[in-house]
């Protein structure tokens, strides 16, 4: 098999994207040197299901919404970022820095920005936080899909939205690389924690290669300590699908409140 690999999820700036690509190259050099690093031009749900996928990164929500039938878990990064604890992460709920919103409840009837409907950090965790405040299945006045967390932050900064939930790792990278954008928003609340974005492989990848990838991921942390610090990486955990069931529980809790979608 001619394997491919890509880490598409935390490329907040071009410099960060270059660091992730270099980190991945070091991992593959040790574990699978013939693997080709590619750009993900096709929609991510299709890319993640490719049978020639050696390693990539996905979100826990699509993983539990059907992707798990096509992939296996490799590892979950542990990040040095506010809102992270081991392999768990949270979303920081933010508003415009000079806006009037000072609590989640105060955003009732206002404009919510979210990156996409299959995001755990931008939609599912926020839905869970809002559900107890909802009335007859509604809470917000307008929903704005932005396509990315940076897009949601930009919508807040430009007064096109009033509130959004941002993956805390992304928010840390924005503070590092896009400080002006970070300063345009302020914290309102935090969502409940859940397992972070996992590294995955096609189910066709042999378990011996998966084990080699796990070893290589840890070794790559030591290859370039300055890069590891820029990537805010602390280590990797090996989780199971049972661990990721906590993401399904966030959805179940919201449904129990009669709040099936951001509305």
Image (cartoon, rainbow, N blue to C red):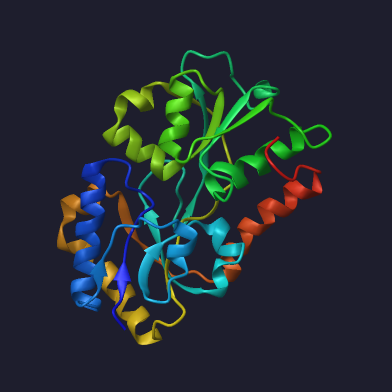
Quarter assignment of residue 43: bottom left
Q: Is residue 131 left or right of residue 125?
A: right
Residue 42 percent across, percent down from the top left: 40, 58
Residue 219 in view of the camera: no
Quarter assignment of residue 67: bottom right
Residue 64 percent across, percent down from the top left: 60, 63
Q: Where 248 falls versus 121 (above or below)?
A: below
Residue visible at 44% across and 19% down in the picture: 158
Q: Where 7 falls versus 189 (above or below)?
A: below
Q: Is residue 196 left or right of residue 1?
A: right
Residue visible at 47% across and 26% down in the picture: 155
Residue 180 percent across, percent down from the top left: 31, 23
Quarter assignment of residue 163: top right
Q: Is residue 232 left or right of residue 113?
A: left
Q: Nearer the viewer, residue 69 or 120?
A: 69
Q: Quadrant of the C terminus?
A: top right
Residue visible at 51% across and 40% down in the picture: 115
Q: Is residue 263 left or right of residue 87?
A: right
Residue 224 in view of the camera: yes
Q: Where 206 falls versus 13 (above or below)?
A: below
Q: Residue furthest front?
A: 42
Q: How many marks?
A: 0
Q: Quadrant of the N terminus?
A: bottom left
Residue 218 percent across, percent down from the top left: 28, 68
Residue visible at 49% across and 18% down in the picture: 159
Q: Residue furthest right?
A: 136
């Amino acid at each position: 098999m001619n394997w491919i690999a890509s880490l598409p999820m935390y490329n907040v700036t071009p410099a960060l994207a270059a660091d992730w690509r270099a980190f991945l190259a070091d991992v593959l050099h040790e574990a699978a040197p013939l693997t080709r690093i590619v750009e993900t031009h096709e929609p991510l749900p299709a890319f993640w299901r490719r049978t020639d996928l050696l390693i990539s990164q996905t979100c826990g929500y699509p993983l539990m919404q059907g992707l798990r039938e096509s992939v296996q878990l490799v590892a979950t990064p542990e990040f040095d970022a506010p809102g992270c604890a081991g392999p768990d992460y949270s979303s920081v709920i933010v508003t415009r820095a000079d806006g009037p919103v000072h609590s989640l409840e105060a955003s009732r009837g206002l404009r919510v920005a979210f990156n996409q409907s299959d995001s755990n950090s931008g939609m599912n965790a926020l839905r869970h936080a809002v559900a107890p405040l909802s009335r007859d299945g509604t809470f917000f006045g307008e929903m704005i899909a932005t396509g990315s967390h940076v897009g949601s932050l930009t919508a807040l900064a430009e007064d096109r939205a009033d509130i959004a939930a941002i993956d805390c790792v992304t928010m840390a990278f924005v503070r590092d690389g896009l400080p002006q954008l970070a300063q345009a928003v302020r914290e309102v609340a935090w969502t409940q924690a859940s397992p972070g974005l996992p590294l995955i492989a096609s189910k066709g990848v042999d378990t011996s290669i998966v084990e080699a990838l796990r070893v290589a991921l840890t070794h790559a942390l030591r290859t370039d300590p300055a890069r590891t610090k820029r990537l805010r990486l602390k280590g990797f955990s090996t989780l199971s699908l049972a661990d990721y069931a906590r993401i399904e529980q966030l959805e179940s809790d919201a449904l129990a409140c009669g709040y099936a979608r951001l509305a």
